[in-house]
Amino acid sequence: EVQLVQSGVEAKKPGESLKISCKASGYNFPNYWIAWLRQMPGRGLEWVGFIYPDDSDTSYSPSFQGQVTISVDKSISTAYLHWNSLKASDTAMYYCGRHSAGDNRIDFWGQGSLVTVSS
Amino acid sequence: QPVLTQPPSASASLGASVTLTCTLSSGYSDYKVDWYQQRPGMGPRFVMRVGTGGIVGSKGDGIPDRFSVLGSGLNRYLTIKNIQEDDESDFHCGADHGSGSDLVYVFGGGTKVTVL
């Protein structure tokens, strides 16, 4: 059974750094792109970017380029989303999702990680 | 890259049918669209992919037969027949553009479905 299990709730202050995680199981982790997605309160989904675990090839949506970093530890089947300096506007639910091989649908999703940034 | 447009809300009485629309921007009529369901307080789940020929591939795990799709021109439709209280959700459409590390994935704004 494919599962993506994300790290929990985070409450941070502006300027702080943060790394959230997404641990995969039930499939061949290196060979599927893993995406991060943002959902701000009351809003729709936004695709942040993705990473190919086998070679760490990474791509970002232009809206998020330079704002976050996506990384992976293939040895523990875990992907990460990292901020160097959080802003209040980063407050959102963040999901990881697996892109299906071949047609790019996001066929499995994590349960979400809530990030709240407030002074 | 395409822009996807969804009406913000839709409603149907219990047991009736509702059709949701996702409209692609001009020039992208050959694109396929993915539908996702997001129940209140939950993460999204994949429903199915649709092109102009109808469903592409398989439905997502646990998606009932009451859910079906059609595609025509720039529009991609998701129909829910015999709607149940459990179907009350936000529905998002998404589409990929490009390939490999040049891929971007875009979403519509989502449609909130209310069961009356």
Image (cartoon, rainbow, N blue to C red):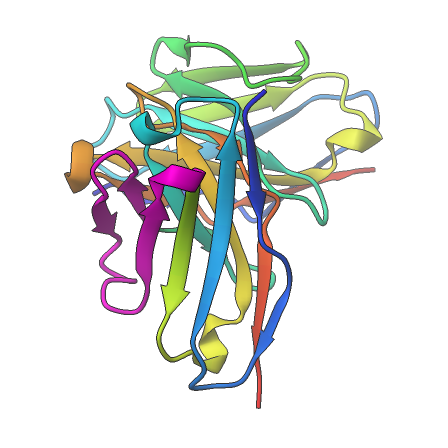
Residue B16: x percent and y percent?
77, 21
Instruction: Name, please, the residue furthest toward the front.
Output: A75
Left or right: where B112 falls relative to B49: right
Q: Quadrant of residue B97?
A: top left
Q: Is residue A77 left or right of residue A60?
A: right
Between A44 and B25, the residue placed more toward the observer is: A44
Total tally of numbered discs in the picture: 0
Residue at point 53% right, 14% down?
B59
Where is residue B116 drawn, in percent x and y?
Answer: 83, 37
Q: Is residue A54 left or right of residue B40?
A: left
Q: Which residues are magenta?
A: A49-77
User: Up-down: is B90 above or below B46?
Assistant: below
- Image quadrant of residue A1? top right
Residue lying at 41% horizontally and 47% vertically, measured from the top left: A79
Is B108 within the magenta?
no
Q: Quadrant of residue A52?
A: top left
Outermost residue on the bottom side: it is A119
Residue in view at x 82 percent, y 20 percent: B15
Closest to the observer, A35 or B89: A35
Residue A30 visible, this orientation: yes
A55 within the magenta span = yes
